[in-house]
Amino acid sequence: MNNTHLKLPDGRSLPFTIRPNPRAKYLRMHLSVDKGLVVTQPPGVTAQQLLHWINSQMGWITTHLPKVEQQTQPPTATTLPDRLEFPATGARFRLAYVPTAHHNIATDLADDGTLTLSGAVGNPEHCRYVLREWTKNYARHHLGQMLQQLAVQTGLGYVSYSVKGQATRWGSCSSRGNINLNYKLVLLPVAWVRYTLIHELCHTVEMNHSKQFWALVAKFVPEYKTIHAQMKGAMQHLPDWTKIG
Ligand SMILES: [Zn+2]
């Protein structure tokens, strides 16, 4: 597939997708909310002929485009968050949703802390997916920094770390010293995150939950029992956009 742009009579530029189809007999175009403008290219039709044909269909495009754009209105505040708050780092981001005819969603973070999602934002599920992916990247960076600092402070080493979207666990540690962290940790208080990271770092020494393991945890987090109890059920109380489906 090929992506390119079409200049509209009102000066705007409309992205479209060329889909070569060996079984197609005629040039065809389809306009939809999720895929935008898609042009089917049959065998033997050159790119130049295709562009000429698209331009000859401008009347059809300008008639149908407003109907599709109407369906890509900003979603209501009840289905999508208007801000992201990460207690783990103290960061807050205002969210803005800007509908365009584009079938993807792009993110842009401004200096004032506004994160703009633009594109097919009429689809709340797609928006939530983009928020999860954006937060995962954010978490990868910030949790990685925290883990590195705590490794230095505690003298506990690790081989590597990764950030994932586990459904039930905050973190895990393999026998090789690879630590997996849940990106949703950035939504928790910093003391809880610190405890979770230290818990996983301690597993690089004790691969179990033995007395020795908890004694090691207690060395760095004396109040670990309280935090451990507070964290029970915390996964269920996260914002809806973190939940898949
Ligand atoms: Zn453990």
Image (cartoon, helix red, strand yellow):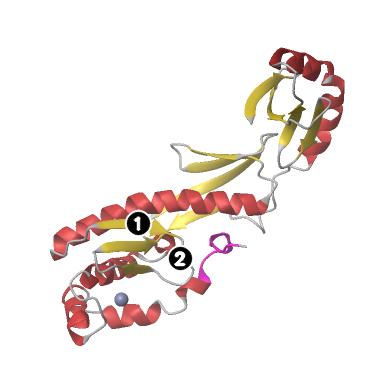
Q: Element under label 1?
A: strand
Three-letter residue code for mark 1: Ser
Q: Quadrant of ligand 1?
A: bottom left
- Magenta segment: does it hold 241? yes
Against 65, residue 53 (above or below) is above
Quarter of the view holding residue 218 = bottom left
| Dot label at residue 210 | none
Against 81, residue 226 (above or below) is below
- According to the picture, the residue beneath numbered tag 1 turns out to be 162
Q: Is residue 133 left or right of residue 171?
A: right
Q: Position of residue 97 (x, y in %)?
A: 62, 43
Three-letter residue code for mark 2: Gln
Against 71, residue 154 (above or below) is below
- According to the picture, the residue beneath numbered tag 2 turns out to be 166
Quarter of the view holding residue 117 = top right
Q: Is residue 24 left or right of residue 199?
A: right
Q: Residue at x 66, y 58 (%)?
A: 79
Do residues under tags 2 and 1 come within 8 Å of each other at their CB atoms? no
Q: Position of residue 216 (x, y in %)?
A: 17, 77
Q: CA distance from mark 2 to mark 1?
A: 11 Å
Quarter of the view holding residue 60 = top right
Q: Position of residue 209 (x, y in %)?
A: 26, 82
Q: Is residue 134 left or right of residue 225?
A: right
Q: Element under label 2?
A: loop
Quadrant of the drawing holding the C terminus: bottom right
Q: Residue at x 73, y 43 (%)?
A: 73
Magenta span of residues: 237-244
Badge 1 local density, few (<14 within 10 Å), some, or many (20+)? some
- Magenta segment: does it hold 30? no
Q: How many marks?
A: 2
- Residue 131 in view: yes
